[in-house]
Image: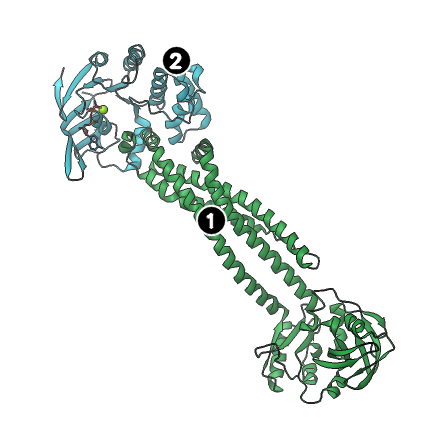
């Protein structure tokens, strides 16, 4: 019986072909917009998470200054941090702007303190020496690829940093755009010079303030436990102006921001679904009016109110569902295209693709059927409650 | 004495249009015994259709009682009334009232759909009835592809499909030429001869002639037998 009503509904929708299609298009556009936005958003989220993962890894904790502004810094007691059980390595990232005189040119360049413990992180960062042997003792400098180019230095040259000579023992492989800039939490690896941390401290005497700290959690140790302990040690050693962020939290924060933006955009796009729903309602009210007599006839031959209700709900739900299904396809197509275009434009590494989740597909279909059915509810109710005689007498 | 199939007792119907009250029935008593063939005649506006709608459980009286097979059905719920209509009463209207998007066969099937009959059974039953009214070769035609007489025959087949105890016909020949009209009336007479109970509303004396009894209505009252 329900099946028969459904078949009847399908035929009625097909019968008023043009009007049904116009109604469906209303839902289609709204659904497509929402699906495209969500799909792009999810894709973006995934690719950002992946990048964070590449840069930081799951078992790295980031210590950042709590204060506002990009100039904020923290003072870290690395020795105390290294004592924390479960900590494999701890480093401070401190970068100063130094006056550098190279063989061909001189100028101000970022100078970053190097700590052998950084190797723990460098491996993860895929920082590779393109030339030279790397650090072995103080008084040596390693150059970022572009820094080397800028001052015209090669391995074996001596460069002067803040009036002190340093021998070039390595040049880093050029970092891909977009990654090299963000590695080490905002330090432009390509542009930077690296000297031993102790040398940096001597070059820039005064309080040893770092932009960031990184803590590597030993394999097998509970990240959250180590994090809590690191926080405790920081507080104990007087570093109260810092906060410790794990990979989970970082991606979570990015996701939260992205979700907010996404929800806002999807909400705006959702309004067009609402408009589509009003279109369904309009079509269904018209249909009820046109078929008033037909409703009367069906009641005369034994249709109950519930049958009429179901029939009209099926019709509106069907239009919603078809609109939703087509909108889903169009939306995913748009998202995929947009992803390719964005990937090209910004040369996002490995590109990013729009995400197609099962949840999105099922959600879109259910939602559009729901919009159709809900929009059809009032018209269907009107049809169902029509007194049979009035419906039959209707001219 | 046999139990009457249908009884109306002191039925009135007042239509309210804003402030104005329009009395359509002013106290009607009517008994329809099994096997009867009753014609109701009367001038336009005398309340014939109103009476038929109340008798067919399509409408409720303003006052009075409606008894179906001895049971008071006056205040039954809409769903129960729909069920009674579907199973026990068949309607034939002046304007045929077929559903334009359905084929002749599907129109005939429709009452069985709402009773939850299985597709194969109801299709077979509908085909049988189309054959009975002489339209075996018109199953797939839409109402728009049938003549008026043919449409009315489809409507009769539909009225018969659930083997109802009572057939109510409101001016079934009103939209037909005399030849087609006579055919329909003959068909109704044949049904009565095979035991169906019928009530026929008409203002055509010749049409009323096929019935066994004729009642006259005027101004919302039954004036008596002609
Ligand atoms: N829905 C309604 N609202 C108001 N008045 C109505 C309504 N339906 C019927 N009437 C009035 O009730 C009276 C009886 O109407 P009814 O249709 O029963 O007459 P009838 O005998 O069938 O006439 P006809 O032979 O022209 O079909 C008429 O005066 C009509 O105007
Ligand atoms: Mg009438």
The N terminus of chain B lies in quadrant: top left
Q: Nearer the viewer, residue A392 or B125?
A: A392
Q: Residue furthest top?
A: B179
Mark 2 belongs to chain? B
User: Does the image show residue B107?
Assistant: yes
Relative to A30, is A77 above or below? Answer: below
Mark 1 belongs to chain? A
**Residue at 39 percent of width and 39 percent of height:** A284
Q: Residue furthest front?
A: A105
The C terminus of chain B lies in quadrant: top left
Q: Are marks 2 and 1 on the same chain?
A: no
Say which mark, if any, is on residue A79: none
The percent coordinates of residue A349 (x first, y second) are 70, 59
The residue beneath circle 2 is B134
Relative to A4, is B226 above or below? Answer: above
The residue beneath circle 1 is A273
Q: CA distance from mark 2 to mark 1?
A: 51 Å
Q: Identify the chain drawn in cyan.
A: B
The percent coordinates of residue A76 (x first, y second) are 66, 83
Relative to A391, is B222 above or below? Answer: above
Label 1: few (<14), some (14–19) or many (≥20) C-alpha neighbours in 10 Å? many
Q: Residue furthest left?
A: B223
Q: CB of residue at label 1: within 8 Å of ligand 1?
A: no
Label 2: few (<14), some (14–19) or many (≥20) C-alpha neighbours in 10 Å? some
Chain A, colour shown: green
In the image, is B132 to the left or to the right of A210? left
User: Does the image show residue A224?
Assistant: no
């Amino acid at each position: 019986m329900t099946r028969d009503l459904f078949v009847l509904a399908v035929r009625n929708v097909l019968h008023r072909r043009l009007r049904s299609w116009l109604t469906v298009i209303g839902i289609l556009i709204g659904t497509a917009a929402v699906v495209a936005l969500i799909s792009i958003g999810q894709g973006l989220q995934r690719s950002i998470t992946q990048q964070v993962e590449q840069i930081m890894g799951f078992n790295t904790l980031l210590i950042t200054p709590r204060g506002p502004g990009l100039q904020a810094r923290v003072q870290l007691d690395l020795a105390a941090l290294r004592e924390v059980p479960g900590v494999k390595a701890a480093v401070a990232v401190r970068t100063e702007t130094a006056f550098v005189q190279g063989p061909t040119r001189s100028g101000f360049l970022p100078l970053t303190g190097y700590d052998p413990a950084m190797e723990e992180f460098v491996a993860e960062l895929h920082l590779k020496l393109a030339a030279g042997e790397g650090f072995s003792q103080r008084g040596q400098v390693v150059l970022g690829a572009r820094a080397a180019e800028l001052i015209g230095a090669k391995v074996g040259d001596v460069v002067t940093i803040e009036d002190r000579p340093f021998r070039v023992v390595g040049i880093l492989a050029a970092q891909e755009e977009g990654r090299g800039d963000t590695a080490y939490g905002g330090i432009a690896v390509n542009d930077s010079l690296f000297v031993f941390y102790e040398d940096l401290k001597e070059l820039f005497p005064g309080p040893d303030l770092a932009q960031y700290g990184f803590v590597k959690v030993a394999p097998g140790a509970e990240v959250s436990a180590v994090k809590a302990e690191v926080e405790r040690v920081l507080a104990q050693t007087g570093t109260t102006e810092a906060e410790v962020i794990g990979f989970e939290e970082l991606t979570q924060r990015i996701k939260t921001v992205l979700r907010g933006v996404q929800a806002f955009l999807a909400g705006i796009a959702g309004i067009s679904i609402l408009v589509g729903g009003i279109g369904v309602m309009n079509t269904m009210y018209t249909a009820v009016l046109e078929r008033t007599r037909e409703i009367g006839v069906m009641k005369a031959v034994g249709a109950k109110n519930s049958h009429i209700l179901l029939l009209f709900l099926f019709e509106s739900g069907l239009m919603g569902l078809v609109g939703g299904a087509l909108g889903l396809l169009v939306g995913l197509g748009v998202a995929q295209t947009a992803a390719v275009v964005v990937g090209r434009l910004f040369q996002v590494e490995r590109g990013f693709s729009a995400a197609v989740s099962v949840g999105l597909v099922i959600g879109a279909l259910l939602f559009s059927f729901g919009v159709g059915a809900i929009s059809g509810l009032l018209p269907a109710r009107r049809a169902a409650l029509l007194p049979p005689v009035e419906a039959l007498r209707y001219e | 004495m046999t139990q009457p199939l249908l009884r109306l007792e002191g039925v009135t119907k007042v239509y309210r249009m804003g402030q104005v009250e329009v009395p359509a029935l002013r106290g009607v008593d009517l008994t329809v015994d099994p096997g009867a063939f009753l014609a109701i005649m009367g001038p336009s506006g005398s309340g014939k259709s109103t009476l038929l709608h109340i008798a067919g459980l399509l409408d409720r009286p303003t006052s009075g009682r409606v008894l179906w097979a001895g049971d008071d059905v006056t205040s039954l719920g809409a769903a129960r009334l729909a069920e009674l209509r579907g199973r026990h009463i068949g309607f034939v209207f002046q304007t045929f009232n077929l559903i334009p998007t359905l084929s002749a066969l599907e129109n005939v099937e429709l009452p069985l759909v709402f009773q939850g009959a299985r597709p194969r059974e109801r299709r077979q039953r509908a085909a049988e009835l189309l054959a009975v009214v002489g339209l075996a070769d018109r199953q797939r035609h839409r109402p728009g592809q049938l003549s008026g007489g043919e449409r009315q025959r489809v409507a009769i087949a539909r009225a018969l499909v659930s083997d109802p105890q009572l057939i109510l016909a409101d001016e079934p020949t009103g939209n037909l030429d005399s030849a087609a009209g006579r055919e329909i009336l003959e068909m109704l007479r044949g049904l009565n001869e095979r035991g169906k109970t019928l009530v026929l509303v008409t203002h055509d004396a010749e049409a009323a002639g096929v019935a066994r009894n004729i009642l006259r209505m005027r101004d919302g009252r039954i004036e008596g037998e002609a």
